[in-house]
Image: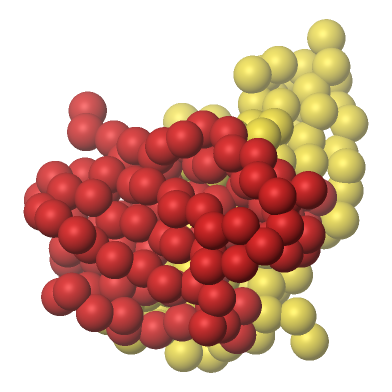
Chain colours: A red, B yellow
């Protein structure tokens, strides 16, 4: 069964450094998402992406964040200058099209900012 | 009012028990409703979608009441492997379908 994959599984970085989290959505999916989950808290929406542009973003997704689909398979989340409060689990998700509601989640990248 | 609110839990039950999870949501524009389960430090995995007519999948039954903006999940004959956090999830509305998660209710099934 096709799966969303994410790399790396864990990332430790120093405050102020840039990080890029990578995702490979399921191959025929058209809608892509990033969510995050701070330890002990709920999963929160960050951004949705369709047709090579951001469709919607949350208040969390400020100027320090950006997303990109550099080729036909990868979907990346960049944090330009990490802060301590960016420490969280970051989940990528995808879904096939507008009429399908189910989103499929990747295993996540655990980011720790020191 | 929180966008998606769930019983705080945790629920500790013996094997074979019946467990009920409740959830309310505030966005009347939401059109799709789900229960996900999340194991510790893992990604959310879809357990089942929730339809207005109610739906059942083996030991799991989900109900939706749009008028009261209420969703429920019933697990019958609970197993040790049902131990997880159960997340009530609604979509925001629109084709993007951004998901809004509840904080989850942790279930521990004991032998």
* Residue A85 locus on image (x, y percent): 76, 63
B64 or A45, nearer to the observer: A45
State the quadrant of the N terminus of chain A: top left
Q: Is residue A37 left or right of residue B48?
A: right
Residue at x-position 45% and y-position 53%: A20
Q: Is residue A92 left or right of residue A49?
A: right
A29 or B97, nearer to the observer: A29
Residue B25, compared with residue B55, is above or below; it is: below
Q: Quadrant of residue B39?
A: top right
B2 or A31, nearer to the observer: A31
Q: Quadrant of residue B71?
A: bottom right
* Residue B93 locus on image (x, y percent): 40, 83
* Residue B88 locus on image (x, y percent): 61, 59
Q: Quadrant of residue B42?
A: top right
Q: How many numbered callouts?
A: 0
A11 or B64, nearer to the observer: A11
Residue at x-position 16% and y-position 48%: A73
Observer able to see residue B1: yes
* Residue B38 locus on image (x, y percent): 61, 39
Residue B6, compared with residue A88, is above or below; it is: below
Residue at x-position 21% and y-position 45%: A26
Residue extending farthest to the top is: B111
Residue at x-position 74% and y-position 70%: B5
């Amino acid at each position: 069964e096709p799966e969303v994959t994410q790399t790396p599984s864990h990332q430790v970085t120093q405050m102020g450094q840039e990080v890029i989290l990578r995702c490979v959505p399921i191959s025929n999916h058209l809608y892509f998402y990033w969510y995050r989950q701070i330890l002990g808290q709920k999963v929160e929406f960050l951004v949705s992406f369709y047709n090579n542009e951001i469709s919607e973003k949350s208040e969390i997704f400020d100027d320090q964040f950006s997303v990109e689909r550099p080729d036909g398979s990868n979907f990346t989340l960049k944090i330009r200058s990490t802060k301590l409060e960016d420490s969280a689990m970051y989940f990528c998700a995808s879904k096939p099209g507008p009429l399908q509601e189910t989103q499929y989640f990747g295993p996540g990248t655990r980011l720790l900012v020191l | 009012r929180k966008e998606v609110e769930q019983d705080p839990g945790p629920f500790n039950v013996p094997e074979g028990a019946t467990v009920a999870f409740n959830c309310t949501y505030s966005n009347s524009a939401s059109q799709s409703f789900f229960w996900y389960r999340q194991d510790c430090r893992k990604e959310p995995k879809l357990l089942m979608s929730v339809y207005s007519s109610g739906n059942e999948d083996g030991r799991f039954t989900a109900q939706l009441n749009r008028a009261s903006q209420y969703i429920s999940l019933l697990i019958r004959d609970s197993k040790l492997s049902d131990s997880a956090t159960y997340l009530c999830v609604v979509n925001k509305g629109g084709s993007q379908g951004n998901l809004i998660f509840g904080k989850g209710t942790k279930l521990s099934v004991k032998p």
